[in-house]
Image (cartoon, coloured by chain):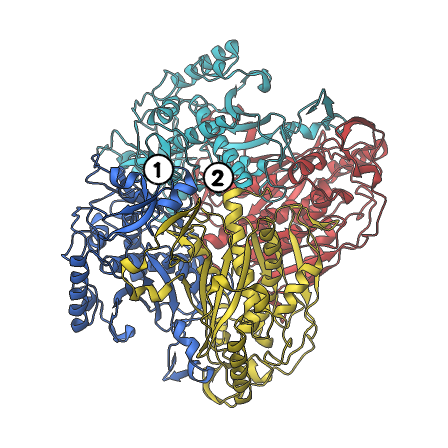
Chain colours: A blue, B yellow, C cyan, D red
Amino acid sequence: MSSIFGNIFRVSTFGESHGVAVGCVIDGCPSGIEISEFDIQKDLDLRRPGQSHITTDRNEGDKVEILSGIFEGKTTGTPICMIVRNADQRSHDYSEIKDIFRPSHADFVYQMKYGIRDYRGGGRSSARETLARVAAGAVAKKILSQKGIEIFSFTQQVYNIKTEINPSEVKKEDIFSNIVRCPDKEISLKMIDLIEQMKSEGDSVGGVICGVVKNCPVGLGQPVAQKLSSSLASAMMSINAVKGFEIGSGFASSLMKGSEHNDEICNTDGEISTKTNHAGGIVAGISNGEDIIFKVAFKPVSTIKKPQNSINTDFENIKIDTIKGRHDPCVLPRAVPIVDAMSAITILDHLIMENGLKF
Amino acid sequence: MSSIFGNIFRVSTFGESHGVAVGCVIDGCPSGIEISEFDIQKDLDLRRPGQSHITTDRNEGDKVEILSGIFEGKTTGTPICMIVRNADQRSHDYSEIKDIFRPSHADFVYQMKYGIRDYRGGGRSSARETLARVAAGAVAKKILSQKGIEIFSFTQQVYNIKTEINPSEVKKEDIFSNIVRCPDKEISLKMIDLIEQMKSEGDSVGGVICGVVKNCPVGLGQPVAQKLSSSLASAMMSINAVKGFEIGSGFASSLMKGSEHNDEICNTDGEISTKTNHAGGIVAGISNGEDIIFKVAFKPVSTIKKPQNSINTDFENIKIDTIKGRHDPCVLPRAVPIVDAMSAITILDHLIMENGLKF
Amino acid sequence: MSSIFGNIFRVSTFGESHGVAVGCVIDGCPSGIEISEFDIQKDLDLRRPGQSHITTDRNEGDKVEILSGIFEGKTTGTPICMIVRNADQRSHDYSEIKDIFRPSHADFVYQMKYGIRDYRGGGRSSARETLARVAAGAVAKKILSQKGIEIFSFTQQVYNIKTEINPSEVKKEDIFSNIVRCPDKEISLKMIDLIEQMKSEGDSVGGVICGVVKNCPVGLGQPVAQKLSSSLASAMMSINAVKGFEIGSGFASSLMKGSEHNDEICNTDGEISTKTNHAGGIVAGISNGEDIIFKVAFKPVSTIKKPQNSINTDFENIKIDTIKGRHDPCVLPRAVPIVDAMSAITILDHLIMENGLKF
Amino acid sequence: MSSIFGNIFRVSTFGESHGVAVGCVIDGCPSGIEISEFDIQKDLDLRRPGQSHITTDRNEGDKVEILSGIFEGKTTGTPICMIVRNADQRSHDYSEIKDIFRPSHADFVYQMKYGIRDYRGGGRSSARETLARVAAGAVAKKILSQKGIEIFSFTQQVYNIKTEINPSEVKKEDIFSNIVRCPDKEISLKMIDLIEQMKSEGDSVGGVICGVVKNCPVGLGQPVAQKLSSSLASAMMSINAVKGFEIGSGFASSLMKGSEHNDEICNTDGEISTKTNHAGGIVAGISNGEDIIFKVAFKPVSTIKKPQNSINTDFENIKIDTIKGRHDPCVLPRAVPIVDAMSAITILDHLIMENGLKF
């Protein structure tokens, strides 16, 4: 099982939802970067369960502890291990899910693949694993920001509610001005209403997060096997509940003609840019200096409070009345920092592969 | 620059459009597999330019030569090198594109990244590179077929013309019964009409290819960093002109509720299956035994015969009247074997990572 | 900086000598293997400082804590994180070494490479890092033992005192019957005497550890780039203070003729074996079924209590009177479990690359 | 089977002794480097069989052809494929070795590992594969020389004849002034005599090659898993017939005390250097600016013209009278360019990992 992301800047995550701790090791981090637990905690708090009434009611502090790699407030170039102990790992009653395979959950495939699974709260397949990525992403984002590269993402669509805001014009502060992480104030209120409704119905919805990378230098990405768009797609598809990835015009490009889709290049007083950005900032796998813009599709979360049919671990057909526990009716608000983290880890890894570790 | 795909079954491609040869080395291929140049040629012929009137008029034989790794008709476990010499590498007149950056082509990013570019026919960024992948894919497909795993894909949509055929019910022979590679006879005719129209207009269109993997064993894929869906997304995004990837319900999942989207599991006379397949055969990054179904979005090709604005290599604004040369008005018919190849390479690499090299 | 060993069974170590904790993450571990903290602790105790009067007087408990990857006493196939908190990380007085570069220590190269170094007790370059490898090695050894593969090593030479025992006839229990880890009782006493003498002189000595792998299946190892002998050499050279590696006849082979050196193959009642084992169990990079036998040369440790010349961090020439602190006059006794660990990690990684993760 | 060396500068070799061709693909080569077939051919000629009366009588032209990656005389950053067609692949009579396993050859392990082997001239296990490495090494050496880094190696010992010349004082031109590649004129004559004697006896001898890297910048190498010494050891152990690797003082360090072995550091008019170089230029896995000096032990080649016992492919005991064919009585003269190549590939790969691809 591989839980290691990246080629030179490598992030190895570990930990189960209800095990002792969740965390990560960052191998290949440049030295001399100021990093404190505060930098990490800030991002973890944006992903934290229970942060608002539209996320799960589960409330965990998620306090990070840095175990290595930082000396006198700076990275030393050695591996950085960070852990978050699971607040509550007392033996809950898991009898409900121990012997069944919940529809669209990892239960069945884990059991078939490994012959054993830590069923407590989803174990390793729980989205709790992503807190380790957010911690690593906080480090990556800090390093990138020193190069002037800005990473952010926002909730663009929840179910059938969608903002038409131009991603290149989004202001980072507007994203975090509301609990649904949509920079369009009006739309954000509708999204919140919808999520509240889903919560009361015991159902769930998905949506689309749009990711943006600003000031990425021209020339990042490999032209055949490690295209920047391939790496971003792989990173995004690794996030729980993600079903699709698009760069720039994406699937909509299939409804355009070449004469409409081509991005004309122009020199405006010495600035090279394209008139349109259907490329989404990446041409032939390589960044062209425009904003990198991609979209990530999230399915509705699998945990719902409705009756469903499935099988148990003896492969007998069963009826599941409702699944207990506290879960998110919509993961997007908490997934925004995860998309940011994976975006930052991917961009930084490419940057280091190209330009080396000297920062 | 990395042109190496895979982890254990590794495919390294090389060659430029108008260089001496294009080819690949397969490292980590199981031994004892019967492979002949005929097996490879068969697939290359499906990708060959000039194979029908809706592809480019360029006509190249693309004869493969195996240089190593095969002994008495079987793989020996050693690296397999295959090359196709470029029939026509005489010095054409490239003055037209030598000093300009064509919109939405790799010209600009290659020049900025490497400070040099082989401008002859697009050089390394030419889709001609993909013939090397098709050659490697032919080997992968043959190995997979011995495990009972079937790989195919088909043209699902060209511009606004789309077939509604159920991917799980597509018959492989129907795909290759027409030149546009769409198993829906009626729709295929409309697609061909449209492409002919584009050709006459000097414009281009894109579309969607749907990929299918049948009989993939349960449990393939890693659950965090090397999800099978991540690997497939990365592989597909590496194909020229690809802008998006979806697994199963994809972006459409964002418009469904959890109660609609969850795939209920049932045991029917000992056969475990899901009632629906919104997952597209992959749950939490791991195959669940259902058909793997994914979609790949292709933009309209950038080479069009219409006037466009751009800059030259001195960064001066210029007007391009029309780009000479013979090109595909729609890449999808020839991209079908490429999607197959990348799908097969990806699935086989995962299979070998899981189960080892003994076949 | 890479601290990740292995290709599929990957061990990522982290931690500094006087940081918060030292530990490792094992990624790609087969599922269903019984592992407890006791299994790990047993090996850590063999590496522990202060375990006998010929090792350093520093006395650390080195209690391991497993943070993830184990459920109900068994591996689940998910990453295993293990940490050992540093008992004593109070702010010592490091003024003595903070501003100087000790001869043959990592001080100078770390400072030049990273522009920063955690000077406390050597930081990351301290051999304390190897406890993380021993922890991972304990897991690897347990898995290998289930395949019948036995891993051990022993002190073959300390300075000019050397045992002539045949490595293939060494009994594991004899190795740990004395504190110097030499299975030759008589020689072990002389070695202990010598080390005691070095300790009293404030000097240090090195020596040779011989590693043995028994019952390795025929056919392990890749024939060109990932020869089993290459992987073992790389693993051994990564251990602190190691200066050389030999497989089988090693450097002595240069003093033999082909007619003496060739290992004749014979079939004795159905058992294929070689009459001699100059190959050391590996031919052309691949195991041949004989005992794998290799030697690892350790230099005398750099920390001595004698006056030395060097430079300080301002690059000024200085005289170092003596370096305070408690150190090993000879690392070999404590290095035996480290050689075992790296040997086991290497063999298991190759085994999994060949045969997959199913155990 | 992996035949890929390196992490970013990756060299993939392919080809069998009596197959169609032997060659390599270099992936991750910096752009803008002037490379011609002449640069490659020069090094291939130093490795060529039949170049002198002390090498094999087999005489092959070994003409290199560059298939990709070079445009207008310069590297473009795209993969470079180079091949050498095997001059003579007519069907020889291999009945002699087809059905037997020659002692200390790869025959047995290949058959057991793969269930099939290309027995013609040793197939993939033939040292003929190393010509692909020499070709790639020629590219690496040229790039390194632009950074002022000089790579060379020389025959230090043949059987019991050894030069005492200081490796740091060797002049490159002296190495190639004689056919045995030993810069010590007097000793070289004795070595030649000895090899001639072995040839006439039908026996073989091994020896030691000493490798030198001059002007390696301080700070190259990773401190734990990818120590520069680990990478060099792995690279050297991958060369056919190599049995041991030492850095600096190597195995001899075990006979020194710490007080003798430590390399004192001093500042001489602003130049930082060590008084001795027992480290061999690498401390704690990282280059310290001194000459990198290592030794590689070669066993006597396995092909001898003397009677030997072995088994056939039916596992029956047999007597081999003599093995026909023309072989080297001592591989060292032809192995010098191979050691150079692997040294250059390793150093360059580390340099690119540290500092990126921009040259």
Q: Is residue D18 left or right of residue B326?
A: right
Which of the two residues, A126 or B165, is positioned nearer the viewer here?
Answer: B165
Q: Residue furthest front?
A: B269
SS under mark 1: loop
Question: Eyeballing the image, is C57 above or below B247?
Answer: above
Q: How many marks?
A: 2
Q: Residues within 10 Å of mark 2 (few under 14, many from 20)?
A: many
Q: Is residue B32 left or right of residue B161?
A: right
- What is the three-letter code of the residue carrying label 2? Leu
Q: Residue furthest top?
A: C186
> In 3D space, how far apart are the residues under numbered discs 1 and 2 (Cα atoms)?
15 Å
Q: Quadrant of residue D246?
A: top right
Q: Is residue C224 left or right of residue A223?
A: right
Kindly tell me whether residue A304 is visible in this rendering: yes
Q: Earlier in the sequence, mark 1 or mark 2?
A: 1
Residue B97: percent from the left, percent from the top?
Answer: 56, 82
Which of the two residues, D338 or C79, is positioned nearer the viewer here?
Answer: C79
Q: Residue at x 52, y 59 (%)?
A: B343
Residue D254: percent from the left, percent from the top?
Answer: 52, 25
Give the letter of the chain under mark 1: C
Residue D312: percent from the left, percent from the top?
Answer: 77, 31
SS under mark 2: loop
To which residue does mark 1 refer?
C69
To which residue does mark 2 refer?
C357
Q: Is residue A39 left or right of residue A277?
A: left
Question: Eyeballing the image, is B312 above or below C110?
Answer: below
Kindly tell me whether residue A222 is visible in this rendering: no
Which of the two residues, C331 or A105, is positioned nearer the viewer here?
Answer: A105
Give the letter of the chain under mark 2: C
- What is the three-letter code of the residue carrying label 1? Gly
